[in-house]
Image (spheres, grey):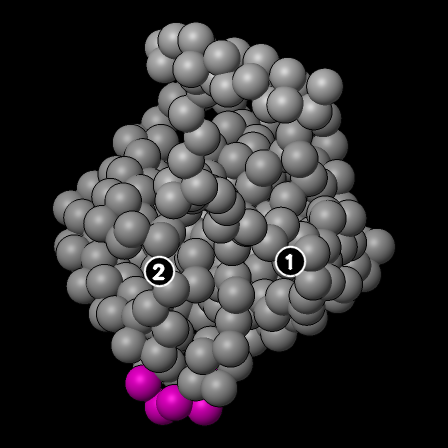
Amino acid sequence: MRYLIIIISIIFLVGCNSNDMVEVSFSEKQDVLFEDYVIPFQFFPRTIEVVGLGDSLTQGVGDELKREGYFGRLQQHFSQYNGIEAVDLTNTAKRGRRSDQLLKMLKAGDIDHHIRKAHLITLTIGGNDIMKVIKKDLFNLKVEAFEKELNKFEKNYEQILDEIREINSTAPIIIMGLYNPITIVTDEKSEFDLILNNWNEAIEEMAEDDMNACFIPIDHLFVTNTNLVYHTDFFHPNSKGYQLVIDEIVSSMQDCGLIDEDNRELLF
């Protein structure tokens, strides 16, 4: 019986077609692909440093709530985004400061350490350069005088940006435009509107020349005072006006790719 089983097994093996055999190879191994893991931007809570440069608009003059204008409100707004543990503010702005004075301050190097560690820089300058012309020839204002001052202002502004970039080449600079407070007196179009447009265009062009700068237009926010956005001095914004500035900053930063509002993330 044992021999019979052996014979049948041999016949079965010989009769099998080689094409029916399944070839198994142990020499080939498939590579297992692992994608690089990207740590989410907000995984580690971080503190961001924001530095304010410029004049009374960044200083927050006119804010009756004493919240340091738009600049102070940035702290509360930015702290609401994912991954932000704290927002530290350094406000170096001063009422009445002109572009030549800001440039002098930057060249002195007294605030280099603040600029160097900044994650974001805000800048408002130019309003007092215009006021310098107005105060000089109040009753004999000529467009030529503003054009001459604009040439000086542009040179100062370019040097201001150069000074900042020598210290910090990567931090985004929020560059604010100018507005016309004269509209609170009259709604009529004047030569001053054209003058202001020229200055704002110059500022915007300089912002566009810097890859990490974002221009914030604010002239449309203060066309009249029908919605009560001016302080009692009829020149500076009040708390409501500064909140409008904050809204414009956030909107423009989204357009500049610095904020992802859908995912509530700061991208700088």
> How much space separates mark 1 and mark 2, taking CA atoms?
21 Å
Q: Few, some or many C-alpha atoms within 10 Å of disc 1 (few <14, some 14-19, many ≥20)?
A: many
* Foreground of the two, 239 or 3: 3
x and y percent of residue 168 in the render?
Answer: 38, 73
Q: Is residue 50 left or right of residue 113?
A: right
At a point 23% along the width and 63% down the height, the residue shown is 158
Query: Would you name the residue on which mark 1 appears?
Result: 71
Residue 87 painted magenta: no
Q: Quadrant of residue 2?
A: top right
Residue 90: x and y in percent read 62, 74
Q: Looking at this view, name the residue that lies furthest to the right.
A: 65
- Which residue corresponds to the image point at 72% horizontal and 19% vertical from the top-left? 1
Q: Looking at the rendered structure, which numbered label has been put on residue 252?
A: none
Q: Which residue is mark 2?
A: 129
Segment tinted magenta in the rendering: 107-111
The amino acid type found where label 2 is placed reads Asp
Q: Quarter-wise, where is residue 133 in the image? A: bottom left
Q: Is residue 193 above or below residue 36?
A: above
Q: Quadrant of residue 87?
A: bottom right
Q: Amino acid at mark 1?
A: Phe
